Image (cartoon, coloured by chain):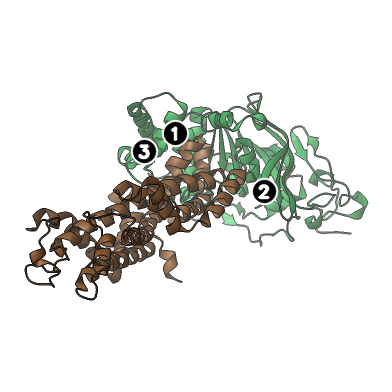
Chain colours: A brown, B green
Amino acid sequence: MTTSPERQDQPFVFPSPRRKERRYPEPPLGPSEAGAPVRASSLWRDAWYRYIRNRGAVIAGAVFVLLVAYCLIWPLVSAYDPYEVDFSQASEGPSPGHPFGTDQFGRDLFTRTALGGRVSIGIGFAATLVILAIGVTYGSIAGFLGGVTDNVLMRFLDALYGLPYLPFAIIVLAIFGGGSFWTMVIALSIASWFTTARIVRGQVITLKENDYVRAAYAVGAKRSRILLRHLLPNTLGVLVIAVFLELPGVILGEAFLSFIGLGISPPDASWGSMAQDGYRAYRVSPHIIIVPSVAIATLILCANFIADGLRDALDPRTRET
Amino acid sequence: MLLEVRDLQTHFFTREGVVRAVDGISFSVERGKTLGIVGESGCGKSVTALSIMGLVPKPPARIVGGEVLFEGRDLTTLSERELSDVRGDEIAMVFQDPMTSLNPTLTIGTQLVETLRRHTDVSRQEARRRAIELLEEVQLPKPEQRLKDYPHRLSGGMRQRVMIALALSCNPSLLIADEPTTALDVTVQAQVLDLLDELRRGHDMAMIFITHDMGVIAEVADEVVVMYAGQVVEQASVKELFDRPEHPYTEALLGALPQLEDGTARQQRLTAIAGRPPDLVDPPDGCRFAARCPYAGEPDGCAEHMPALREIRSGHLVRSEHPASERAGRPAGVTS
């Protein structure tokens, strides 16, 4: 709000003890009435502008979207049945008819890579969401309640941190009998939500010192409402980053488990199980292992670049360092 | 009496020791009146306000003694749940910095409607209607549109108006305003002050107005409490305090104000108070102002013994061995 011109040229008169009736000009009008229309600029809009200035992140985002679109759409329009075995065309190299060639069973790799991508990316996002759900709940409770509760929860988390992620996932798969989509999701998320919990706890602890939290208490808001309405929505920026930070690890984990034969099993495809198929014949037809490996690498690279771009966009301060 | 604070003590338990931020203060607020609390930074004004609301950060702070009687109920003994029913409904608070006191992720409307529905049993539509009325009452232009706005679209003055609307939403009988105008520029300050005063009269609220600005106190308060280093050093009606200040600290505060006489500024340098307030971890045994007081001398022994808060005239309390009216002919600035 600017000082109104009528009062600017008068000397400032210190208020006297006697109360006087004074009339002030109407309060200045809001931004939308001030003349030229002012576009609303919010945290998310600002973040978007910062994000699109980061060339690497924009390219990574575009590649990521294309990759996901390819995985979703191509199996629907492809001329080849990804499950149909045709030994007459086995292990062919890339050709106009089969851009990525075929595998040992004569299946079109371009179609199968899309199909495998669905499973890999699907498991990746599902497991990341489960990680977020557990991590946010655990971390926000610890951070919000503080004190003894926080101490107990965090020490327990320290103990869990000792759990090696992949062996633990293997044990879980052994117990639940691995192979299906959801057991993979559980196996991959059950031992990897610790970092997210810590991030959220840290955020909640910082946020709860905010003036608006105190102001909310001052109007009688209940604790549950403070947490759900005032604290968690403000952690959203960090959570968006966390999604893209967790995603590569989870996708890599899935690929590894499928590669060693504990995950998605034939004839269903994931990038990991396709790499396993290729591994058996890598001397004769290396393209069978190269195609899924490059797909995994591309996806992880994109996710990392996106996470980086998001972090710069949503928290501009880290850029300085 | 609407609110009676008796011998309130709020201490902060820190690594360096116990900080006696509020060290035995008492005052009362009458229904419909305004009590001003003045003092410099760190004298315990805000902690006093937060103690009344039960909002002191614990840990490290804790109310270690005294009572806060609101309509006869001792608020310090209430549970968190009972307190949250009182907050916003019967006692509301306006904070210093309107820029950070609104949640950036919720619209103005949401924040108002949720506060209204917290304390009153009204439908969403009804609450929305009330919210518009409130924004009109605090003279925010185009209230219907403001409801859909996020706080970042509003200026500081407008946000403070929203904060005031939030505080008023459930018709509290006591409003605590903790330096509500400090973060605003001078013209907006005057508008917000007038608005607060107008609303206080309209709603028949009592108000506790906390500030470090004697000029603002003169404008709004009926009764004034001067705080220094966690204690009350002087208390009087606003007229009495400004006409006949007794405590050397109050005098010094008034001496640090620019004055106007016959429309021109007095050609005099403003006097600052030398020194700093005492460390509240280990406050001196004697008068806490002694180290900075121009009148403190050995014969009084006020550096060794804490002077009592005594009634020097009807309704005028002072905690000093040498209030102005007892300093016969002794020139200011002379120390032994």
The extreme bottom residue here reads A283
Q: Which residue is depicted at the point 22% across and 74% down?
A: A286
* Element at label 3: helix
Q: Position of residue B113 (x, y in %)?
A: 39, 33
Q: Earlier in the sequence, mark 3 or mark 2?
A: 2
Same chain letter for marks 3 and 2: yes
Which of pointers 1 and 2 indicates the residue nearer the eye? Answer: 1
Q: Residues within 10 Å of mark 2 (few under 14, many from 20)?
A: many
Q: In this rendering, is residue A55 above or below A313?
A: below
Chain name for mark 2: B
Q: Position of residue A306 (x, y in %)?
A: 32, 64
Q: Which residue is mark 1?
A: B115
Q: Earlier in the sequence, mark 1 or mark 3?
A: 3
* Element at label 2: loop
Chain name for mark 1: B
Q: Is residue B205 left or right of residue A48?
A: right
- The label shown at residue B39 is 2
- The label shown at residue B109 is 3
Residue B332 shows in the view: no
